[in-house]
Image (spheres, rainbow, N blue to C red):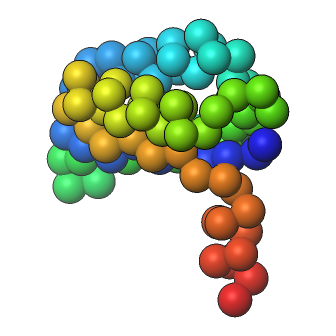
Amino acid sequence: MKAVVTVLGEDKVGIIAKVSQLLAQRNINILDVSQTIMANNFVMMMAVMVPDDLDNHQLNDEFTNLGKEIGVEITLRNAKIYDAMHNL
């Protein structure tokens, strides 16, 4: 499944590394990435390819837990949601 990972929170060292590490551990390929700092907040969006055998609810729990650990909000959503929003 093609999905979008968003990360938002206070900028600090290691955010990209920790998120990328979790993706690599789950064999999730990063297709595209964009990150910036807006009003002292770190903002990142990644297009990723999630293997079909992974459970989305479990992945979301893992991202939520990682976000709490590093002080950011991380979400994983099916890319079809973003596609539909842009085609309204």
Residue 75: image x %, image y %?
45, 46
Q: Quadrant of the C terminus?
A: bottom right
Quick check: can you spot residue 81? yes
| The N terminus sits in image quarter | top right
Q: Is residue 34 visible?
A: no
Q: Residue at x 53, y 32 (%)?
A: 59
> Is 13 drawn above or below residue 82 in the view shown?
above
Snapshot quadrant of residue 65: top left
Is residue 73 or residue 45 the one in the foreground?
Answer: 73
Where is 28 relative to 60, above or below?
above
Instruction: Please give left or right for residue 1 compared with residue 26 in the image.
Output: right
Residue 67 versus residue 7: which sits nearer the camera?
A: 67
In x, y percent, where is residue 51? 78, 28
- Towards the viewer: 72 or 76: 76
Relative side of 3 to 44, left or right: right
Residue 30 position in % (x across, y down): 69, 29
The quarter of the displayed image where residue 70 is located: top left
Total number of numbered discs in the rendering: 0
Residue in view at x 31 percent, y 43 percent: 73
Q: Residue at x 59, y 10 (%)?
A: 25
Q: Residue furthest bottom?
A: 88
Is 58 left, or right, of 51 in this rendering?
A: left
The residue at 53%/40% (across/down) is 57
